[in-house]
Image (cartoon, rainbow, N blue to C red):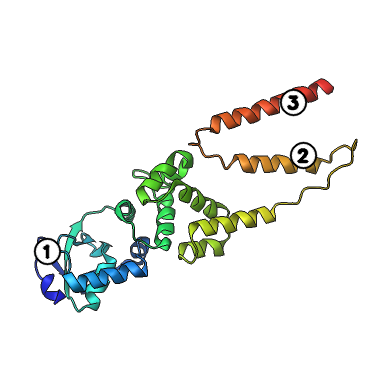
Amino acid sequence: MVTERVACGVFPNREIDSLVIDPEFAAVLEQDADAVEKLRERIKRNGYDLADPVIVWKGHDVIVDGHTRVRILGDLGVEQVPVNEREYATRDDVLRDIIDMQASRRNISRASLARAIRLQDERKPQGQRTDLASNDAKSPGRSRQETARKLGTSPATIDRHRYVQAHGDEETKRRMDDGEITVGAAWTQTRRRVAQEKPSPPPRRRRGEMPPEPMGMYHANRAVDELSCIGNDDKQRKQAFSHVMAWIQKRTEENNGKA
């Protein structure tokens, strides 16, 4: 029986009923249904791996890592589970550890990935009491590679998630966080909606007709939108901006010469 195979080990056992599941912590790295079922069958077949204890916040009895295992063992009639108690100063420290654990995971749900990216950006840096934005969030160009590495995903996914968080409507963000749609799908929907909400360009002017002011501002706003998509870590960022500035300077000199 599974109960017999988790009875003793290197780590001390705790009653499962004494452990607390924090909804916020449990939601960060929720596994998808297929991964949960495979884990259930493996535990039923081979027993619980005693070298992989449930991580618990010492003094609070709150599960930090192992929510899925605890649920499965409880369903199988197991009353005790080996635990590794760790000390944390704050909830932010717990969340930081949970997110860092993601670096070695490859079977979490897309909802958990979306939540982990959001929490990574919202994390409060150590030593700062009022700023809830992480260093990653404050320097997105430099940080996208680091955030992607921590969460085991691509820099493009980080960029798209941040775009949805900045420009997406509440329904799209909710569906992304709940795993109903992927980060890529949420990004595509948001880009399409933003494009549709932009004002249509004024009609083309006839030859010799002076352009109305809205035409100039329309194209200027479009140029700003496109340039804002260039990340700080883009290898051609400096070259692209230099090219734009050179064009602006040339047109300015031409206009001044005609004046």
Q: Residues within 10 Å of mark 3 (few under 14, many from 20)?
A: few
Q: Quadrant of the C terminus?
A: top right
Query: Toward the viewer: 41 or 258?
Result: 41
Q: Residue furthest top?
A: 257
Q: Position of residue 187 (x, y in %)?
A: 55, 55
Q: Residue drawn 58% across and 60% down?
A: 169
Query: Toward the viewer: 98 or 62?
Result: 98
Mark 2, secondary structure of its residue? helix
Which mark sits nearer the N-terminus, 3 or 1? Answer: 1
Q: Is residue 39 left or right of residue 152?
A: left
Mark 1 vs mark 2: give the one in front.
2
Q: Position of residue 47 (x, y in %)?
A: 16, 70
Q: Position of residue 90 (x, y in %)?
A: 30, 54
Residue 239 lies in what quarter of the image? top right
Q: Amino acid at mark 1?
A: Pro
Which mark sits nearer the N-terminus, 2 or 3? Answer: 2
Q: Amino acid at mark 2?
A: Gly
User: Is residue 20 visible in the rendered structure shown here?
Assistant: no
Report, in whole angstroms, how far the alpha carbon at label 1 lies from the one at label 2.
71 Å
Mark 3, secondary structure of its residue? helix
Q: Residues within 10 Å of mark 2 (few under 14, many from 20)?
A: few
Numbered badge on residue 216:
2
Q: Position of residue 199 (x, y in %)?
A: 74, 51
Mark 1, secondary structure of its residue? loop
On screen, residue 217 above or below 7:
above
User: Is residue 221 visible in the rendered structure shown here?
Assistant: yes
Numbered badge on residue 12:
1
Q: Residue drawn 34% across and 53% down?
A: 99
Q: Residue drawn 29% across and 53% down?
A: 104
Residue identified by numbered label 3? 252
